[in-house]
């Protein structure tokens, strides 16, 4: 091990390992539900009083926005997502903070999982349906959940950094 402090070591190995784990779990769950359980044929499966497993093919992005019903639209989403993933991979490769690396890895792993679906099936396989009474949350998958957690992690980091920077500036800390 290097004598460098952990916070100064590049975290790209850790980040890409987390992204790979997310990708494998996402694809394994999807394949299990699609091929073993055959959720398309069996229909909804009640898991709890607030969650069902159902199959919904999402041809858009998160929350079903920007639905693409043409091949051109499908491939434009693939290319657009690949560009975003490339940017996030660069950011991940240069991350010096484990929180940021983890957040980025969750997004990258989830995004690649959804890209694989879009290429293989023409749409993303979503299956977790949460609800409470008549309130119904959108249907999502493991990749969507990890992307959401990654974005929340980045937002938390941004808020905490802003607060810390503001506190340093008001307490006479060094300013740039």
Image (cartoon, rainbow, N blue to C red):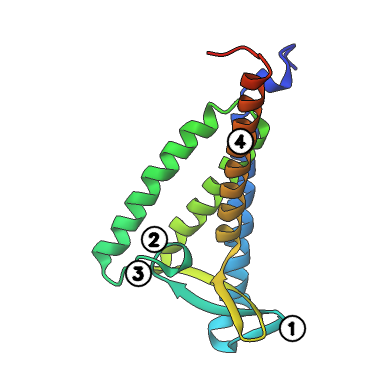
**Vertical position of residue 72 compared to residue 101: above or below:** below
**Vertical position of residue 130 compared to residue 86: above or below:** below
Element under disc 1: loop
Label 2 packing within 10 angstroms: few (<14), some (14-19), many (20+): few
What residue does disc 1 label?
A: 49
Q: Earlier in the sequence, mark 4 or mark 2?
A: 4
> Which quadrant of the figure has residue 84?
top left
What residue does disc 4 label?
A: 100
Question: Marks 3 and 4, how far apart in space?
Answer: 30 Å
Question: Marks 4 and 2, how far apart in space?
Answer: 28 Å
What residue does disc 2 label?
A: 119
Question: Marks 3 and 2, how far apart in space?
Answer: 15 Å
Residue 103 falls left or right of residue 46: left
Element under disc 3: loop
Q: Position of residue 104 (x, y in %)?
A: 56, 41
Q: Nearer the viewer, residue 97 or 126?
A: 97
Can I make out residue 9 in this image?
no
Q: Position of residue 33 (x, y in %)?
A: 61, 74
What residue does disc 3 label?
A: 67
Can I make out residue 14 in this image?
yes
Question: Marks 1 and 2, how far apart in space?
Answer: 34 Å
Label 1 packing within 10 angstroms: few (<14), some (14-19), many (20+): few
> Which quadrant of the figure has residue 26?
bottom right
Question: Marks 3 and 1, how far apart in space?
Answer: 30 Å
Q: Earlier in the sequence, mark 1 or mark 2?
A: 1
Q: Earlier in the sequence, mark 3 or mark 2?
A: 3
Q: Earlier in the sequence, mark 3 or mark 1?
A: 1
Residue 49 falls left or right of residue 162: right
């Amino acid at each position: 091990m290097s004598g460098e402090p952990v916070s100064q070591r590049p975290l790209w190995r850790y980040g890409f390992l987390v992204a790979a784990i997310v990708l494998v779990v996402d694809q394994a769950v999807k394949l299990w539900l699609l091929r073993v359980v055959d959720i398309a044929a069996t229909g909804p499966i009640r898991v709890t009083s607030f969650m069902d497993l159902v199959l919904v093919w999402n041809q858009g992005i998160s929350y079903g926005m920007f639905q693409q019903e043409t091949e051109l639209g499908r491939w434009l989403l693939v290319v657009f997502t690949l560009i975003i993933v490339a940017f996030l991979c660069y950011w991940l490769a240069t991350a010096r903070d484990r929180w940021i690396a983890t957040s980025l890895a969750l997004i990258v792993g989830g995004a690649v999982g959804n890209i694989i679906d879009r290429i293989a099936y023409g749409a993303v396989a979503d299956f977790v349906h949460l609800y409470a009474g008549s309130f119904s949350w959108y249907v999502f998958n493991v990749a969507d959940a990890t992307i959401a957690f990654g974005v929340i992690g980045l937002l938390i980091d941004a808020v905490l950094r802003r607060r810390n920077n503001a506190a340093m500036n008001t307490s006479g800390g060094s300013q740039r």
